[in-house]
Every structure is written in structure tokens, then in C-alpha cells.
Image (tube, grey):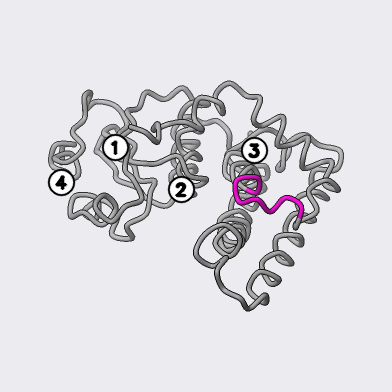
Amino acid sequence: MQQIADFPITRRWPPADPGIIQLYSFPTQNGVKVSIALEELGLPYEAHRVTLSDADVRSPEFLSLNPNNKIPALIDPNGPDGAPIALWESGAILIYVAEKTGRLLGSSDAERYQVIKWLMFQMGGVGPMFGQLGYFFKFAGAKIEDPRPRERFVSEARRLLAVIESALDGQEWIAGDYSIADIALAPWIAGLEYYGVQDEVGWDDLSNTKAYLDRFLARPAVQRGRVIPRPEG
């Protein structure tokens, strides 16, 4: 049976305790999804700081775990049937740790699919669109004189936020009870402030969404998970 020491990534980021989950991440909107989930679920884990530099995410060791060279990635030495399992893609990891513990994924089949629906909404819509919005406002895309890319992603962000605002009318969490869907979605909503685009997307008009984000950020596990791994090392 494969052991955790058989994974090449452990040569660059050696585990202190090879018997617990090994998380390879950085505190971006996608990275903190997993650290927050692990904190909420109380699963023992060890976080390894993998920066977004090519020296880390394109290193042979990291690529051996995730050929898509993106954080987060994870190895659970106690995976299905007692064998280690390696995972990447934050949505897949969230489903895995929720199923492993039987928590944060609804209490019935119907609720489970509602959670997964909103998780996919974040993965396929909010993450990519908000990420492009940030690129064209805060990062290299901001230097592009053509206004059409910015207009495109502002419009799409407004549309997605309207979906969220409507869904939160009369309920505290996006899929009913607090779940991995919230853990996926709320960090990206919080990222709008970091990108400096709250005014552009009409933040002050989103009373349900603002209250939702405040509830999320007040959770102790969220506060811990948002700074794991610490960006300064």
C-alpha cells in the first residue's frame, strides 16, 4: 500500500506528522476554502505554505501532486479503504472532507444536492468571473485602455451578486444550513473589497449579502482558516 512518504511532494514540504492530512496551499480566495473547512470540521491537518510563484507551483514536487499547478492540494493518509488519497481542485476537496466527516453537506440527499448546486455556482461562475474582475481592476489588466473587459466583468459580477442577494432573502446561509457552499462562496465575496470594486458592483445595495458576509467572517473557524498558511511563512 502506498505511504505518504511515497509522494514526491513530501521531499520539498516534509510532514511533521505524516499521519494527518497534509494541505498545500496559500491564503487566496480558493486556498482558504480548504483551511476554513478543515477548521470548521476539526480535522487534524498540517498546512504547508506553497506560494503562487513558479518556483513553488511549477516545481516538479508540486506538479507531481497537481499537474494543473494550482493551490490548494491535499493528501489524506487515511483516505478511502485506509489508503492515502491525493486531491486537487478546491470544490472536490470540500466535498471530500464534508463526506469524510458527514458534516456541512446537508442532512438529506435533497439538501446535499442543494449544497452541491451552490458549490458549483461558485466554482463555475463566481470564482472565474470575480477573478477576472480583479485582474482588470487591480492587477495587470488595469493597464488596458479598452474599457470593454472591465465593463463585461462588472456587469457579470453584478448579475451574480443579484442571484446571491435574492437567494439570501429570508435565510442566513446560501443553501439553508451552513455548509461547504458558504465556505466556497463567501471568501470570493470578501475578495471584492481586496480588488477595490465594491462601488462598481453596487455593494451598498446588497443588504442580504453584506449581512451574510458579516456572519461568515464572525465565525471563529473562518477567522483562523483565512490566515492559514500564513502568507509570510
In the picture of the structure, the residue carrying the numbered disc 2 is 90
Is the Cβ of the residue at disc 2 closer than 8 Å to that at disc 1?
no
Query: Which numbered disc, 3 or 2, marks the residue closer to the eye?
Result: 2
User: The residue tagged with tag 4: helix, strand or loop?
Assistant: loop
Name which residue type carries label 4. Answer: Pro
In the picture of the structure, the residue carrying the numbered disc 1 is 81
Query: Which numbered disc, 2 or 1, marks the residue closer to the eye?
Result: 2
Q: Does 196 lie within the magenta span?
A: yes
Q: Residue 70's image quarter?
A: bottom left
Residue 102 percent location from the top left of the image? 51, 31
Q: In 3D space, how far apart are the residues under numbered discs 1 and 4 (Cα atoms)?
A: 22 Å
Name which residue type carries label 1. Answer: Asp
Q: Which residues are magenta?
A: 192-199
Query: Which numbered disc, 1 or 4, marks the residue closer to the eye?
Result: 4
In the picture of the structure, the residue carrying the numbered disc 4 is 8
Name which residue type carries label 3. Answer: Ser
Q: Earlier in the sequence, mark 4 or mark 3?
A: 4
Residue under the image location 21 percent in, 30 percent down: 15
Residue 162 percent location from the top left of the image? 80, 56
User: The residue tagged with tag 1: helix, strand or loop?
Assistant: helix
Q: Residues within 10 Å of mark 3 (few under 14, many from 20)?
A: few
